[in-house]
Image (spheres, coloured by chain):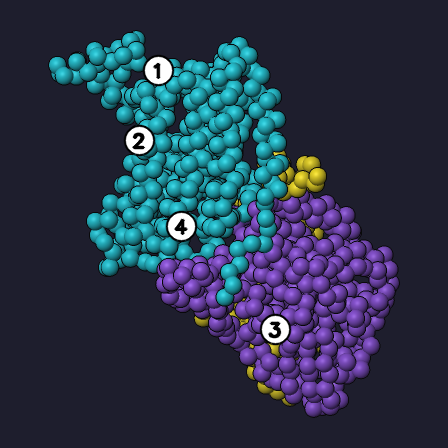
Amino acid sequence: MAIVDLVINTQHPLQAVPPDWPGGFWWHWLFFTVVLIVFVLVMVMAVIYIERRGMGRMQSRLGPNRTGPFGIFQPVADAVKVLLKENIVPTNADKLVHWLAPVVAFAPALLIFAVVPFQNGALLADLDIGILYVVAISSVSTLGIFMAGWGSSNKYSLLGAMRNVAAIVSYEIPLVLAVVGVVLIAGSLSMNQIVLAQGIPFILLQPLGFLIFFIAGCAEINRSPFDLMEADSELVAGFHTEYSGMKFAMFYLVEYAEAVAISAIITTLFLGGWRGPVLPPWLWFIVKVVIVFFVMVWTRTTLPRIRIDQLMAFAWKCLFPLAVINLLITALQVLTLSQDLIWVMIPVNIAIMAVLVLLWSKFFKLGWGRVEV
Amino acid sequence: MTIETKEMMLRTEPFVLNFGPVHPSTHGVYRMRATLDGEVVLDIEPVFGYLHRGIEKLAEQRTFTGFIPLTDRLDYVSSMSNNLAYVMAVEKLAGIKVPERAEYIRVIMAELQRIANHLIANGSFLNDCGAYFTPFLYMFREREKIIDLFEMVSGQRLTYNYMRVGGVSQDIPDEFLPALAKFVKQMPGKVDEYDRLLKQNEILLARAKGVGIISKEQAVNCGISGPILRASGVKWDWRRADPYSIYDRFEFDIPTASDGDCYDRFRVRMEEMRQSLRIVEQAMKQIPAGPVRAEVPHIVRPPAGEAYVHIEAPKGELGFYLVSDDSIAAYRCHVRPTSLINLTALREMVRGWKIADLIIIFGSIDICLGEVDR
Amino acid sequence: MKFERYGIGIVKGLTVTISHLLRHPTVSQYPEQRLNVSRRIRGNELIWSREKCTGCGTCAKTCPQGAIEIVTSTNLAENKYEVEKYQVDNGYCIQCGLCVEACPYDALYMGYSFERAKYRRGELVQADDMLLESAERPASGYFHPEIAQKLPRQTLLIERITEKR
């Protein structure tokens, strides 16, 4: 106990436990751990439901509507179905790797939520390196996916997993560069401070950064239009071909939990987190997460899939230079403009984004990619 | 310099991947064994015959009229065209003239069938591209309206068995023409909606433009016909080149494109839908009253001889070659399988592209396994 | 300078998709809502009329599948054929309707219902009195305009769903 007291008392201004919290450190930890796990699981179920109903309505049909009123128990039915299935492990599979892969893939998705603020100061750990922690942790789930591909002893899974790793690593860089722009304006890496600094939501101040982060985020979580790793109309189901039963459920959960995580990060960084006029802050947070996820569902319904070499070209030739230029412009603006002239950034940044997008569209070539055989 | 870089490159080995008969795409039981080098397709070897039912042999054991339900099942997606081609072949053998009203009804049915077929073709193509069923479902909504009209006329939704030797089997009911008028008024707006959804979509352009090109000379040499030929730049349509039935009375354009890639085939099919709507509108205005079936005995016995009739089916040139020896059944019936002959160009189109492109190019040829295997 | 392919196609597509959220979905909930099928539907089963049938066998000769089997005997007293057995194997039948078209005495009708599936393959073979018209086996108007007039109108998608623009 004494060591814990020492740790808490030697904190500098950002408290591990906010001053108005009733109870000690461990009570805070327990409460938030339970809240986070419940939040993630409930949000994943809600998000699965929103996706299936939303996509159904946009395709001129109804989504699931028979399991429970308006089909709200459909995710529960999915979970029960998946639990009852037989767990098949291929004989040539690397047993430990095969078993560990879903865990390694799922844990980071939960861990990201430790630094996401639900209210002013209401988060599990108000780290001063908040956003850096998020970037670091989200890379670990790539490892889980590659373990899944390797441990399946199936050459098609391995191919899918290798494609996946290449794509994720390529899209990390524009993601991080887009975040750095936000950090420059907010002046701190801590997620709570970033939300507090958003008098004007950063989506207006950093439109290009938002776009780059959204696209790179969708690519990180294998969501359409970048879902060629688990493509339904290509040959195999990708890295999770050989999984069944609860392990498959974990991968399914990973996909949606990461979608919620990226939506939560976007809300915190760009849309103003829990800020809002009338409703309680945590409700605003949930509403904004749902709105961002709905935009992801919208793009999934509309857009076709990109090919793997087009994916890599897009990351390196288009998003990366745009992210670097965005960073340069933002740095210049932060240095020159004072605090009350910050609204000048809005029209300037929107104009720059329009010019850059138009300029880069000139480099968009069609019909390449054929290899001479 | 080139030799040094070659030695430094990784040595890779091609392997054979089997795209099995159970296909993730929606084209039927077709098997391809693709030789791949990494992701690049070097060669493909098609293996088909999983749906062979011996239809050509069965023709020798059915009467001429009794074979019509079996022709429905050749290209099961566009049954009316198959019926029409076969029935025209028998009429040419027997020298039967079809009454005017029946000709107009046949044209309306054939053109509606063309629209329905292109809706499926484009919907499946976009589904293969990865647009998660959205354009597919929109197009099926319109196809449902056409199928309702066909159901009203013939009684079934997929295998119509509507055309007979000497006309059509029954007259159209009274509510057909008003419903058709409503459809024709509404459909161009829907085609515009598909265009807005996807014509300029950058991802579709990146996936389909310049991919799977077949040049004019190659297309003509392979014997390809239909929208693929027209997308490669050859302005050839049997309704203009050798007008059958009463197509010379209608005004319509023949859409062509110049590049011959997947995107052009997609665009040609969209434009053909619009032209078919024009033909249907004109036919609706000009349709006369009268009988719908010529006076033909129930069991037709054409005199001995042979006849070949080809029509512009939605997928290409569908031909029936009939040999009769003055009995109640055909002596030999051979079907010119549009989809099989179009498929012979697949290898040329696909070499050098990647797996994802293989699926797209295969989808853009628009085959139906019933025709390939018969 | 002409600018194309800068994302406008994607934006247009997104507007089309989102506008569908406001429209009525074109679905109907089977089995609670059943649509009216065509008056000329060539439904699941064949319906036979004992009074009109003379046992001529035209239907059996016309059937492409050979699904109809007729056994007759002579009735010399009344100078006509008696139909002893009239059997249809509905498993072979492809519902083409050529038999209905061929019958010179209008003794055959196609069935109107389409939900007449059976649990056993043996039950698909129907003979004699099983083939008569009854309440569970209504007749359709295929080649019988007098019946077609009495049946309800077909629900057409083009008239049913009005999509809000």
Q: For mark 1, name the chain.
A: A
Which is more foreground, mark 4 or mark 2? Answer: 4
Which is more foreground, mark 1 or mark 4? Answer: 4
Q: In the rendering, which numbered label is found on residue B341?
A: 3
What's the residue at 29%, 57% (across, down)? A153
Residue B124 image point, x, y percent: 57, 56
Are circles 4 and 2 on residues that touch, CB within 8 Å? no
Q: Are marks 3 and 1 on the same chain?
A: no
Residue A6 image-quadrant placement = top left
Residue A136 image point, x, y percent: 33, 33
Would residue C28 be found to the left or right of residue A219 on screen?
A: right
Are circles 4 and 3 on residues that touch, CB within 8 Å? no
Residue B327 image-quadrant placement = bottom right
Instruction: Identify which amino acid the numbered label 2 is placed on.
Output: Leu
Q: Do labels 4 and 2 share a chain?
A: yes
Residue carrying label 4: A163
Q: Do labels 2 and 3 share a chain?
A: no
Q: How far apart are marks 1 and 4 (CA)?
A: 40 Å
Q: For mark 4, name the chain.
A: A
Q: What shade has chain B been given?
A: purple
Label 3 CA crowd tier, 10 Å (few <14, some 14–19, many 20+): some
Instruction: Identify which amino acid the numbered label 3 is placed on.
Output: Ile
N-terminal of the pair, mark 4 or mark 2, is 2
Residue A211 image point, x, y percent: 52, 32
